[in-house]
Amino acid sequence: MSWKDLTWKSLMKGLGNSLIAIARGEFLMRLRVERFFPHILYLFFLVWLMIWIGIKSESTQLQVERNKTVLSDMKIYHAQKTVEMMSMNRMSKLEDLLQEKGSEVTFPEKPADKLK
């Protein structure tokens, strides 16, 4: 069979036979590559392993991004608490200074009431 004898009909017939062979599991036998079958299985395993590692890597990167946002929120929270602690320290020094001067002004014992 030469290139001139190939027609669309013969190409479609060959493609159909190949698809049927794939469905029946005979494709590799028709190509006479059964001696390479262990290599093909090994290649399939390696491709599957690379896809699986890629999926795991993406999920790990997604978790890292989530943790970065949580960490930045925690840093902000920590900074706010540090500022509060420093202001409490200053308030105690201020209260000591007011007592030294004999002032009757003190800091409130309870938090302020909210007006509606």
Image (tube, rainbow, N blue to C red):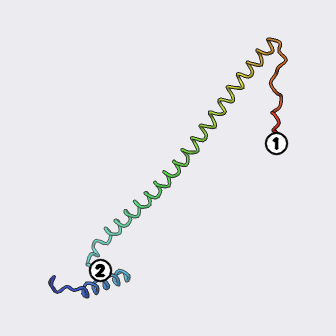
In the figure, 62 relative to 15: above or below?
above
Q: Is residue 53 left or right of residue 4?
A: right
Q: Nearer the viewer, residue 45 or 8?
A: 8
Identified at 73% across, 22% down, the residue is: 91
Label count reads 2
User: Could you tell me which quadrant the N terminus lies in?
Assistant: bottom left
* Residue that protrudes farthest toward the front in the picture: 116
| Circle 2 crowding by C-alpha within 10 Å: few under 14, some 14–19, many from 20 | few
In the figure, 51 relative to 94: above or below?
below
Q: Position of residue 8 (x, y in %)?
A: 25, 85
Q: Label 2 belongs to which residue?
A: 29
Q: Position of residue 44 (x, y in %)?
A: 36, 67
Residue type at the position of mark 2 = Met
Q: Quadrant of residue 106?
A: top right
Q: Earlier in the sequence, mark 2 or mark 1?
A: 2
Q: Nearer the viewer, residue 75 or 39?
A: 75
User: Callout 2: helix, strand or loop?
Assistant: helix
Q: Quadrant of residue 94?
A: top right
Q: Nearer the viewer, residue 94 or 40?
A: 94
Q: Label 2, label 1: how many angstroms apart (C-alpha)?
A: 84 Å
In the figure, 9 relative to 99: above or below?
below
Identified at 82% across, 27% down, the residue is: 108
Identified at 82% across, 39% down, the residue is: 115
Mark 2 vs mark 1, foreground winner is 1
| Circle 1 crowding by C-alpha within 10 Å: few under 14, some 14–19, many from 20 | few
Residue type at the position of mark 1 = Lys
Q: Label 1 belongs to which residue?
A: 116
User: Could you tell me which quadrant the C terminus lies in?
Assistant: top right
Check whether the beta carbons of the residues at disc 2 and disc 1 lie within 8 A of each other: no
Q: Position of residue 35 (x, y in %)?
A: 27, 73
